[in-house]
């Protein structure tokens, strides 16, 4: 039988920090500290795998109890006390400890082993009756809440009443007699709620606590934490049973939490809080105000000196910032836990750089130390942490940042009010491409429906705007221009604030704090005055030197292209030409083209659009001087450009010279049951070749013009939604013919590539044939995920969270690439394509291009680049470097 219980004490342990997977982070680090000679109370750890057994079988294996008893015997010998002994009682704590730190998500119980008899022994042993009964009431309160499910507020009500009667401001001021009475009241409460007395047998207490810790693995908060942080469901939590040391023995005792560096800024400054005459939960309960750790130097000077030496030893040993929990019992320091400290993105970057400079870690290690997704914090404004407001509701954090504005309920209102100087937030049930101008005008977007890759989410991320989507708690009433959350009503013109990093929605105008990185990029702050930016830039410089994957950006305008270059993009991997048509008067020319009765009418309308699109391409080529620009030809179905009624339809009918009825007949003729699989992509170019001709001409004329100004132009023209090589060949022939025409007219030749967007399974399966004629592949993983899994990314948000919660999908496939399905198609198409064309350039341009795990897959699959929203470029750069192993 494999060992499942591991002892530590008296300077020796049966495990080390390398046993994290077996014993969890807390257990492995307790063992490691013991081996280092750090003062740690003796104890033992039950392995993580026993949690899985218990949750599956609803019982511990029969052989575990004898193993626990043997470890408990060793613990008694090491502590010099006996568990349950009336005169010299040993008390223990029972704590959780998963492989990956989950602070506060699972249960802890202190002072196990106390009952009506051992409390007398503890009082005699300590010389303090007050301390003994304070410890006993804490056990009753914690055990009653965690194990017996007695509501905590019932205990708190009795405790508050006792403070009032005794005239005590804090729990620490309650006299012994009050605590004795409180113990009796707690026992009566437990009996009245559970129908049973509090268990006085210490071993019954112990096993009740062990099982409660195992069960806490399934608490909603723990499950949610694992889902959000990508932590595996198995193995579960270890259980740590440790001899109690007491910080509530008097003024020569205390407890605290400390970090070896400031977790907010990363400054090398010992940081933390402590309380005299307290146990651990008092620091976080909020009943007493903790003191800064530096005050400990005056109140407990010897213990503080020991703590300074110990924190320095542990940081050097673990080679990272540590989060410490400690207790001082009658002047003697004990460490109860050390773990890698949680930190902000700014702190993570600074600590990684400083540890390199201090010689503790290498640059490749520093790259791994900063979670790539955390860099979002450095790019977007955040709500001022000093602002106080109640959360109204919570949706999906689709695009980071924070923004305040007045609520408006349609795109035209957003544009009009923004033009008047109002800060607006566009609130919609869901957005469509028709709302694009409203999104441009708004500071942020809030939708009731949609997922992380819905229209609102994708567009907002691409523009660096804050967005909260899929906020199911809100009911949007566009007719009366308001939304409600329960009984709360928010009308048009009312101020709201969104936090795109958390998905939280607030009432009112909350102040935001600008990002230092963004200030430098905007030129309002110099790098010399921006230490966070300097660390950010240096870390990404190390990442660039290490990564193999190139990182491009999805950018549709010259402004987006300049932002992308500022973030280090090495080209544009997706320029969506349709977005250019929604801006200003361009939509009129596009609509005229769509409702034209014949090819001549379409060509006249397209002629109006040509100079506009050419101008956009010139601006993008200038911003990307010397880098490739991949331009996707028109992709969405035409009905998305048309109004569906109202005043806008009336104006369009007048503009194009048709009756409103005739116009609506055209609109209805373009309506499709499933437009995602309908008349779109290359199918439009095949049906209306004049569209492809106009777009190709705009590209080549723009490229020729900027090349004459000394700009290095590298256009890559991408044919969308190809399913057969015949479709690709049809469109390529048009592109090549127009290129030749422009070259003849201008006397200048532009080098270019023509490739395709692989977003259909058939295209992936026939990649060898397509690659014989296509010069590059770009995987459109948003649509490829839809067509592979048979899911609509806009509609699946209604049930995908349930799938993830139930473990049917590990992740939302629109957020994290489905490696087994979509990934397999990418690998197959890449291999088949390069089999037909050596050196075929391959990348992805879906939202997955900025998601760290998906980027790691792309590295392993041998792709040449990833492309993502401009504000995710730094994340992709770091993730690409982290994917390089060794």
Image (cartoon, rainbow, N blue to C red):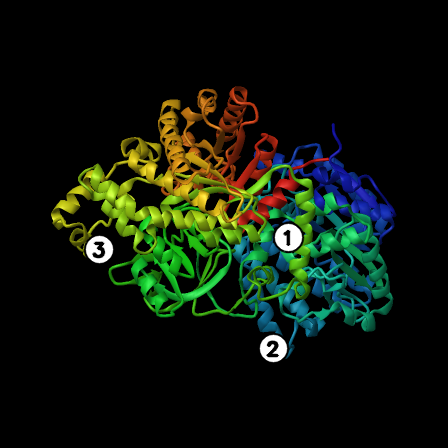
Q: Position of residue 311 (x, y in %)?
A: 81, 57
Could you say which is closer to the camera, residue 425 or residue 779?
779
Q: Are marks 1 and 2 in contact (CB under 8 Å)?
A: no
Q: Which mark is residue 45?
A: none
Please tell me in which quadrant of the rendered image residue 831 appears: top right
Q: CA distance from mark 1 to mark 2?
A: 36 Å
Name the N-terminal-most of marks 1 and 2.
1
Q: Could you tell me if residue 599 is visible in this image? A: yes
Q: Position of residue 268 (x, y in %)?
A: 76, 61
Quadrant housing the N terminus: top right
The residue tagged with tag 1: helix, strand or loop? loop
Q: Which mark is residue 165?
A: 2
Q: Which residue matches tag 3?
A: 648
Q: Position of residue 161 (x, y in %)?
A: 57, 73
The residue tagged with tag 2: helix, strand or loop? helix
Q: Which residue matches tag 1?
A: 103
- Is 416 left, or right, of 536 in this rendering? left
Q: Residue at x 41, y 29 (%)?
A: 760
Task: Relative to 459, say whether 741 is above or below.
Answer: above
Front: mark 3 or 2? 3
Which residue is at the far front?
747
Task: Relative to 45, say whether 320 is above or below.
Answer: below
Could you say which is closer to the camera, residue 272 or residue 377?
377
Task: Relative to 536, say whether 291 is above or below.
Answer: below
Name the N-terminal-most of marks 3 and 2.
2
Q: Residue at x 26, y 43 (%)?
A: 639
Count up the numbered dots. Answer: 3
Q: Could you tell me if residue 233 is visible in this image? A: no
């Amino acid at each position: 039988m494999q060992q499942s219980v591991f002892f530590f004490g008296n300077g020796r342990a049966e495990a080390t920090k390398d046993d994290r997977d077996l014993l969890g982070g807390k257990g492995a680090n307790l063992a490691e500290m013991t081996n280092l000679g750090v003062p740690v109370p003796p104890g033992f750890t039950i392995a993580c795998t026993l949690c899985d057994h218990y949750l599956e079988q609803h019982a511990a294996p029969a052989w575990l109890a004898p193993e626990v008893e043997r470890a408990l015997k060793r613990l008694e010998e090491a502590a010099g006390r006996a568990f349950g002994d009336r005169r010299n009682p040993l008390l223990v704590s029972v704590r959780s400890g998963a492989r990956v730190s989950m602070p506060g998500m699972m249960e802890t119980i202190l002072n196990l082993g106390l009952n009506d008899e051992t409390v007398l022994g503890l009082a005699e042993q300590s010389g303090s009756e007050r301390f003994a009964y304070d410890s006993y009431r804490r056990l009753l309160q914690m055990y009653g809440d965690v194990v017996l499910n007695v509501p905590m507020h019932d205990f708190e009500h009795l405790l508050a009443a006792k403070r009032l009667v005794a005239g005590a401001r804090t729990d620490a001021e309650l006299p012994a007699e009050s605590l004795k009475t409180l113990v009796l009241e707690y026992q009566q409460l437990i009996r009245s709620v559970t129908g049973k007395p509090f268990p006085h047998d210490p071993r019954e207490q112990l096993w009740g606590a062990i099982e409660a810790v195992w069960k806490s693995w399934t608490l909603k908060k723990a499950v949610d934490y694992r889902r959000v942080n990508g932590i595996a469901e198995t193995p579960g939590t270890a259980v740590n049973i440790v001899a109690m040391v007491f910080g509530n023995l008097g003024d020569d005792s205390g407890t605290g939490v400390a970090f070896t560096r400031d977790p907010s800024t990363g400054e090398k400054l010992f940081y933390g809080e402590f309380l005299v005459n307290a146990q651990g939960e008092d620091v976080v309960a909020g009943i007493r105000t903790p003191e800064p750790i530096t005050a400990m130097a005056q109140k407990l000077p010897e213990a503080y000196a020991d703590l300074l030496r110990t924190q320095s030893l542990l940081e050097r040993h673990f080679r990272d910032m540590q989060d410490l929990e400690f207790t001082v019992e009658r002047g003697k320091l004990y460490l109860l836990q050390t773990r890698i400290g949680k930190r902000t993105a700014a702190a993570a970057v600074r600590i990684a750089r400083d540890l390199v400079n201090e010689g503790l870690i290498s640059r490749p290690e520093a790259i791994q130390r900063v979670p790539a997704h955390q860099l979002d914090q450095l790019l977007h404004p955040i709500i001022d942490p000093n602002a106080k407001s109640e959360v109204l509701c919570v949706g999906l954090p689709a695009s980071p940042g924070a923004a305040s504005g007045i609520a408006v309920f349609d795109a035209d209102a957003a544009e009009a009010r923004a033009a008047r100087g109002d800060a607006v937030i566009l609130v919609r049930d869901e957005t469509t491409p028709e709302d694009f101008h409203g999104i441009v005008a708004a500071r942020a977007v809030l939708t009731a429906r949609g997922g992380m890759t819905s229209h609102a989410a994708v567009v907002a991320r691409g523009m660096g705007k804050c967005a909260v989507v899929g906020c199911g708690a809100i009911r949007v009433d566009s007719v009366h221009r308001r939304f409600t959350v329960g009984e709360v009503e928010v009308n048009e013109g009312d101020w709201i604030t969104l936090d795109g990093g958390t998905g939280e929605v607030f009432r009112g105008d909350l102040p935001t704090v600008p990002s230092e990185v963004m200030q430098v990029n905007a030129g309002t702050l110099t790098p010399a005055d921006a230490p966070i930016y300097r660390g950010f830039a240096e870390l990404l410089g190390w990442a660039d030197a290490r990564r193999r994957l190139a990182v491009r950006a999805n950018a549709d305008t010259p402004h987006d292209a300049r932002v992308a270059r500022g973030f280090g993009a090495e080209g544009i991997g997706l320029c969506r030409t349709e977005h250019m048509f929604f801006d200003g008067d361009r939509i009129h020319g596009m609509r005229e083209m769509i409702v034209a009765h014949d090819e001549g009418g379409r060509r006249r309308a397209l002629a109006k659009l040509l100079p506009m699109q050419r101008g956009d391409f010139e601006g993008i080529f200038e911003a990307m001087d010397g880098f490739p620009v991949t331009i996707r030809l028109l992709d969405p179905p035409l009905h998305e450009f048309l109004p569906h009624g109202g005043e806008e339809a009336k104006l369009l009918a007048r503009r194009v010279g048709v009756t409103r009825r005739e116009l609506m007949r055209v609109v209805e003729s373009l309506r499709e049951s499933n437009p995602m699989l309908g008349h779109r992509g290359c199918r439009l170019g095949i049906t209306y070749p004049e569209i492809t001709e106009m777009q190709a001409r705009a590209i080549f004329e723009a490229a020729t013009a900027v090349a004459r100004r000394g700009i290095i132009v590298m256009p890559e023209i991408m044919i969308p939604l190809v399913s057969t090589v015949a479709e690709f060949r049809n469109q390529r022939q048009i592109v090549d013919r127009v290129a030749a025409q422009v070259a003849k007219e201008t006397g200048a030749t532009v080098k270019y590539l023509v490739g395709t967007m692989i977003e259909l399974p058939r295209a992936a399966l026939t990649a060898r044939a397509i690659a014989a004629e296509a010069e590059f592949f770009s995987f459109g993983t948003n649509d490829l995920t839809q067509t592979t899994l048979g899911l609509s990314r806009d509609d699946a948000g209604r049930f995908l969270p349930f799938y993830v919660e139930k473990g049917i999908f590990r992740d939302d496939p629109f957020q994290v690439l489905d490696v087994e399905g979509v990934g397999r198609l990418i690998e197959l198409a890449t291999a088949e394509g390069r089999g037909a064309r050596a050196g075929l350039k391959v990348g992805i341009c879906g939202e997955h291009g900025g998601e760290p795990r998906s980027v790691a897959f792309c590295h392993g699959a041998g792709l040449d680049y990833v492309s993502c929203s401009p504000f995710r470029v730094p994340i992709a750069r770091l993730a690409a470097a982290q994917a390089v192993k060794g």
